[in-house]
Amino acid sequence: MAMALSHYKQPEFSLSKIAIFATLPTDALERIQNCCSWRHYEPGEPIVEYLDDSDDVFFIASGEVRVTLYSSSGRIVSLRDLGAGEVFGEYPAIDGGPRSASVEARTRCAVASMPAGAFQELLATEPKVAQALLPQLVTKIRALTTRVYEFSTLAVKNRIQAELLRLANLASREGKSARIIPAPTHVEIASRVSTHREAVTRELNRLCRIGIAERQGSALLVKDIERLAEMVHEATGE
């Protein structure tokens, strides 16, 4: 399905930076792009809903999305954020099941979608794509296994520390420090570790008092990653 692109910047509408397509020649990438539809999403706009029966696969050309689950009481559990170059929605295309989570735009983003049938044909005809996809699936499974372990065994303060360590390891390093920009809100951290905002506020205030973290405008500075890692290690035994 073609879409009018007159009000979009053309560079956003390219699959060239999608990680699983990195080794494909230009002609193969063009064929894949011709199988896709494009759409622009605004922050907070839903892309797919938990348990719906759609089966398109999505490729993030620009911006970020957030993968979440909502409880019957409306409580939000954030599973992960995905950025440009990443893929989501592949599970239903592979196993025919419903959506395992909701996905919404975290920032303004451009996203390509491909029907499940076309995606299955792509995996069959382009082995390099399947080979690139498998490690990504394993990484997601490992991350979710870690989250389940933390939810099941760690106290709330230790889950907050582990999440802060994850964010610090993804941020730009400055010696033994890392600057997280923008700083996640306390509500966002709470939704990632299955707790409430007040618990996050208490623990972050404590980490600031003992010199591990520091708020700096719109950023959160983790001043001593090694010390934070030791705290998480003591809690997990890993």
Image (spheres, grey):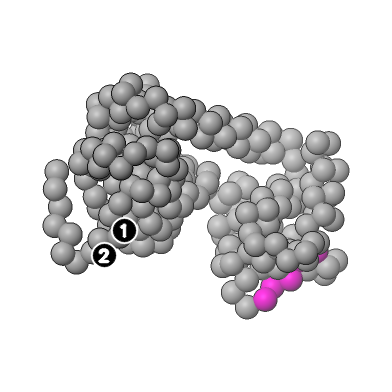
Mark 1 belongs to which amino acid?
Glu
User: Looking at the image, which residue is at 45% across and 32% down?
Assistant: 133
Residue 47 coordinates in the image, percent (x, y): 32, 48
Residue 129 coordinates in the image, percent (x, y): 40, 31
User: Foreground residue, 93 or 159?
Assistant: 93
Mark 2 belongs to which amino acid?
Lys
Q: Main secondary structure of the magenta part?
A: strand
Quadrant of the drawing holding the N terminus? top left
Q: Which mark is residue 12?
A: 1
- Badge 2 is on which residue? 9
User: Looking at the image, which residue is at 42% across and 42% down?
Assistant: 22
The reply to whether discs 2 and 1 touch (Cβ–Cβ < 8 Å) is: yes
Residue 172 coordinates in the image, percent (x, y): 65, 62
User: Foreground residue, 193 or 16?
Assistant: 16
User: Foreground residue, 41 or 185?
Assistant: 41
Q: Would you identify the image quadrant in which residue 90 lies?
A: top left
User: Looking at the image, which residue is at 15% across and 52% down?
Assistant: 3
User: Foreground residue, 207 or 108?
Assistant: 108
Q: Would you identify the image quadrant in which residue 188 lies?
A: bottom right
CA neighbours of label 1 inside 10 A, class few (<14), some (14 to 19), many (20+): some
Magenta part of the chain: 212-216
Taking 42 as reference, is 65 left or right?
A: right
Q: Which mark is residue 27?
A: none
Residue 41 coordinates in the image, percent (x, y): 30, 57
